[in-house]
């Protein structure tokens, strides 16, 4: 039975990944900041012996090291960097902290830490767990908001964090190829979650079904690429 470790698994896309991997018979290590308050995960744990919950705040690198140490000796087939933050929303121009002329640099640093540096720290902390597995995949949920070719202006913290995350996954693909590890970045589409909001056109289940299919099909020859949930290759 393969194992997936998911960050930010208590709600949104991370919770849907957890549900679907459990239903598909995987061993799931569902991590989140507050497992004691994660009621949906606890309900799933009552139904699935193959679900393990673990505390992991991706912004706290000591917390990542502690989780990796607690799981030492466990092979992880898919390390799934899902946790992410958007930063302040510029709705109707009322919160301009990600807009030119009024950037909040503290917030930008916080967004970069969660969306960009944490996936790097996760890869460093868990590389031996992944290398010991059968599938050997490190993947990250990015966004087409990070596409350089189609940049629309504004939303600097989120967009730069995802553009840099794409570079990170490509670079990691090169560095980890010798250990047989394949990497990828994905856009899940615009999905109705707390981050995606009520106006989003898609629900999580079809997107996550598609992403699991793409993850299942990843090959070393395609390591480091950026994919849409449908399996279409995305431009940088
Ligand atoms: N929804 C969309 O339309 C969309 C589109 C493109 C990309 N994405 C990406 O997809 C991923 C999941 O997004 P979502 O829509 O599910 O967002 P969401 O509903 O806001 O959920 C975000 C998840 O990330 C967790 N998280 C945030 N900071 C964390 C930290 N420091 N440590 C651990 N977990 C942390 C949250 O945990 P808490 O409950 O503890 O805050 C929550 O579980 C993100 O990377 C996002 O950028 C989403």
Image (tube, rainbow, N blue to C red):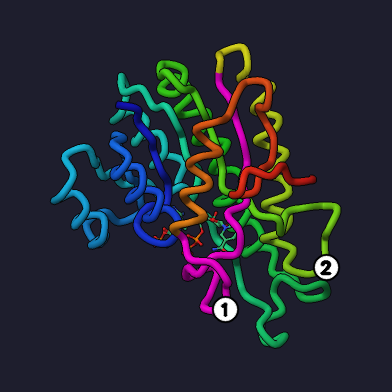
Q: Which residue is mark 1?
A: 199
Residue drawn at x 68%, y 79% is 90
Query: In terms of secondary structure, what is the magenta stretch mainly?
Result: loop
Q: In the image as oriented, which residue stretches furthest toward the left?
A: 46
Observer-nearest residue: 98 or 170?
A: 170
Compared across the picture, whether 105 is left or right of 79 comes to: right
Image coordinates of residue 7 in percent, x first then y, are 42, 46
**Labels 2 and 1 touching (C-beta < 8 A):** no
Q: CA distance from mark 2 to mark 1?
A: 21 Å
Observer-nearest residue: 233 or 165?
A: 233
Is residue 153 magenta-colored?
no
Q: In the image as oriented, which residue stretches furthest toward the right?
A: 149
Q: Looking at the figure, which quarter contains the C terminus? A: top right
Q: State whether label 1 is within 8 Å of ligand 1.
A: no
Image coordinates of residue 185 in percent, x first then y, are 63, 41
Task: Write the start and end of the magenta stretch as one range.
Answer: 181-204
Q: Nearer the viewer, mark 2 or mark 1?
A: 1
Q: Dot 2 lies on which element?
A: loop
Q: Which residue is mark 2?
A: 153
Residue drawn at x 46%, y 49% is 209
Compared across the picture, whether 37 is left or right of 144 comes to: left
Compared across the picture, whether 127 is left or right of 47 comes to: right
Q: Dot 1 lies on which element?
A: loop
Q: State whether label 2 is within 8 Å of ligand 1.
A: no
Is residue 194 magenta-colored?
yes
Mark positioned earlier in the residue sequence (2 or 1): 2
Total marks in image:
2
Q: Residues within 10 Å of mark 1 (few under 14, many from 20)?
A: few
Residue drawn at x 54%, y 67% is 202
Q: Looking at the figure, which quarter contains the N terminus? A: top left
Observer-nearest residue: 188 or 145?
A: 188
Image coordinates of residue 150 in percent, x first then y, are 83, 58
């Amino acid at each position: 039975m393969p194992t997936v470790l998911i960050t930010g698994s208590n709600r949104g896309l991370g919770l849907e990944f957890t549900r679907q991997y459990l239903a598909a018979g995987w061993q799931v290590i569902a991590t989140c900041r507050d497992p004691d308050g994660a009621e949906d995960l606890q309900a799933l744990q009552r139904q699935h012996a193959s679900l393990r919950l673990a505390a992991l705040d991706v912004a706290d690198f000591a917390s990542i090291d502690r989780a990796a140490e607690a799981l030492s000796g466990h092979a992880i087939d898919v390390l799934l960097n899902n946790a992410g933050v958007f930063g302040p929303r510029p709705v109707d121009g009322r919160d301009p902290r990600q807009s030119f002329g009024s950037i909040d640099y503290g917030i930008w640093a916080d967004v970069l830490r969660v969306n960009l540096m944490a996936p790097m720290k996760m890869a460093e902390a868990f590389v031996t767990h992944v290398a010991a597995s059968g599938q050997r995949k490190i993947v990250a949920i990015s966004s087409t908001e990070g596409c350089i070719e189609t940049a629309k202006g504004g939303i600097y913290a989120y967009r730069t964090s995802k553009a840099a995350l794409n570079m990170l996954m490509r670079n990691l693909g090169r560095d980890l190829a010798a250990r047989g590890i394949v990497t990828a970045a994905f856009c899940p589409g615009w999905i109705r979650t707390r981050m995606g909001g009520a106006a989003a056109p898609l629900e999580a289940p079809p997107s996550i079904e598609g992403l699991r299919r793409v993850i299942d099909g990843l090959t070393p020859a395609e390591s480091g690429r950026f994919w849409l949930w449908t399996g279409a290759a995305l431009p940088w």
